[in-house]
Image (tube, rainbow, N blue to C red):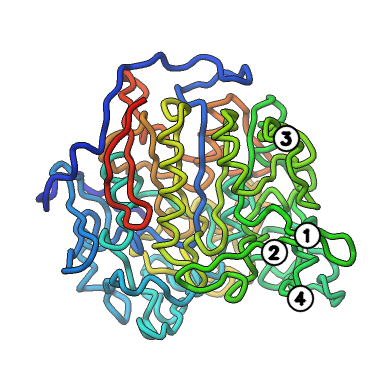
Amino acid sequence: MHHCVTKSLTKALATATAAAITFLPAAPAFGGDKDGSKTATPIKHVVVIFQENVSFDHYFGTYPHAFNLPGETPFQAKEDTPESNTLLSSGLLTNNPNKVNPFRIPPSVPVTCDEDHNYNDEQAAAHGGLMDLFVEKLSCNDKVLGPASTMGYYDGNTVTAMWNYAQYFAMSDNSWGTTFGPSTPGALNLVAGNTFPGTLAPLRPNGKPASAGGNIAGGLTTGSVVGDPRPLLDDCVASNPKFASVNQITMSGKNVGDLLNAKGITWGWFQGGFAPTGVDGQGRAVCGQHHTGLAGDDAVVNAGDYIPHHEPFMYYPQTTNIHHLRPSSMAKIGQTDQANHQYDITDFFAALKNGNLPAVSYVKAGAYQDGHAGYSDPIDEQIFVVGVINALTQSPEWTETAVIIAWDDSDGWYDHQMGTIVMQSNVPDDQLLGAGSCGSPKANDVAGGMQNGRCGFGPRLPLLVISPWAKRNFIDDTITDQSSILRFIEDNWNLGRIGGGSVDAIAGTLNNLFDFGRDRQDRRLILVPQTGTVVGGVSE
């Protein structure tokens, strides 16, 4: 259960740069957007930057206190920074129930191994709320950090941009993965609030029989998704030799794209590497984009920029873009055409420059910048995130924009806080309370008692809101999860609920991260992408 943390003032290390914020005259809120839609708040553009594999403690375990060793990017907290539920405030830095105490990873070690973040092993590490088996169940043996690497965390000398965004805008310390497990469940929960039902394709791309084990709950051919099967309706899975032996699924039911389309609201998913680089001998699109970051060439250490199981809309027949068709024109980005709202990351910046930023945009970095341990890192991630936010901040749309930075799963990095179990499950994959047990699903729960394999809430994850309407230097302890982002979009555009067992029906609100009751003050924060340090504010 979440500890309610007393909000107290910490002793300041120094006052951050005052020039970072520019105040402009208030402007009218609410009203219609370019597409004629009405919103419940002054927000006309929601941009969700959906990153990879970070627990809250892994990035914010000592916030706002950074070590500030010589030669490192310094971080100085604002005097009025509130305390949050961290490793430091909980006293668990030096008296930890795990076999190794948490330790600081210095900025000189941004690249690490990839921890175990399977649905079952994450539950076993939580150990019924004792939170004491992370080393035994999840830790990878890192060549620098050693065999207890899961206990490592970064501070504001490495993830400087994230800490600066928290200083000037709003952050939650009580937000959770909707379920336990890796990337695909997190992505599905973001856009649908549900991981049920996924249906296994009988054959792998190489023609061999598929396996539901570790992919569909209970090893069934149809059920809740607990692993990372790839989308069946995606040319760039079938055409990539590295995916020849993967398992594939399709998803049934609605996602937020269906709700947005029904109301004529512009939207899109923008992902690095989505644009095809050619076709193979069978005429299938090939996604061959790749880049080199600190972890190396992402086509060597992974499968290139485009990672199919990070693209949730490609699992659903109604929102997939099988052949990765490009938008018919830049003016059509966000509207329904041959691209079916699925785009390359370059299309996001093109739409922003062209003045047709969709009402709802999901932004996904290419592999080398998505922050996933093993093939990416927090420095390359920072460059991407800051680049997106700086571009938005300097655009005309900024005054009506909310940027939400969220992550898909914890990667298995240690976090000391256990979440509330709002969805119980007793499939063989469950391990929270023992073999095959995460409680007993009931007929009257949100999943109707028939959607087993959705144990959650899972690990605690960071969540930040950057917007002129966000509260200042604020830490929210309202219980939220990945589907709270879905609910905010539904409520802002009056889309209704998805139904069918979606947890949007019970998701906590993000509204406490905003202050819609005041005249807007146009706060703009510009950071240096490479260092995350403050440059200043800009005005129109």
Q: Which residue is mark 2?
A: 288
The amino acid type of the residue labelled 3 equals: Ser
Mark 2 and mark 1 in contact? Answer it, CB < 8 Å. Answer: yes
Mark 3 and mark 2 in contact? Answer it, CB < 8 Å. Answer: no
The amino acid type of the residue labelled 4 equals: Ser
Q: Which residue is mark 3?
A: 329
Separation of marks 3 and 4 at Cα, in angstroms: 36 Å
Bin the neighbour count of mark 4 within 10 Å (Cα to Cα): few under 14, some 14-19, many 20 and up: some
Q: Viewer-proximal residue, 313 or 337?
A: 337
Query: Which circle, 3 or 4, is nearer the viewer?
Result: 3
Q: Secondary structure at mark 4?
A: loop
Q: Residue at x 52, y 50 (%)?
A: 50
406 shown above or below 305 = above
Separation of marks 4 and 1 at Cα, in angstroms: 22 Å
Q: Which residue is mark 4?
A: 245
Which badge, 3 or 4, comes first in the chain's sequence?
4
Q: Secondary structure at mark 3?
A: loop
Which quadrant would the N terminus be assigned to in this image? bottom left
422 shown above or below 277 = above
Q: Viewer-proximal residue, 412 or 43?
A: 43
Q: Residue at x 61, y 65 (%)?
A: 290
Which quadrant would the C terminus be assigned to in this image? top left
The amino acid type of the residue labelled 1 equals: Gly
Bin the neighbour count of mark 3 within 10 Å (Cα to Cα): few under 14, some 14-19, many 20 and up: few
The amino acid type of the residue labelled 2 equals: Gly
Q: Is residue 337 visible?
A: yes
Q: Which residue is mark 1?
A: 278
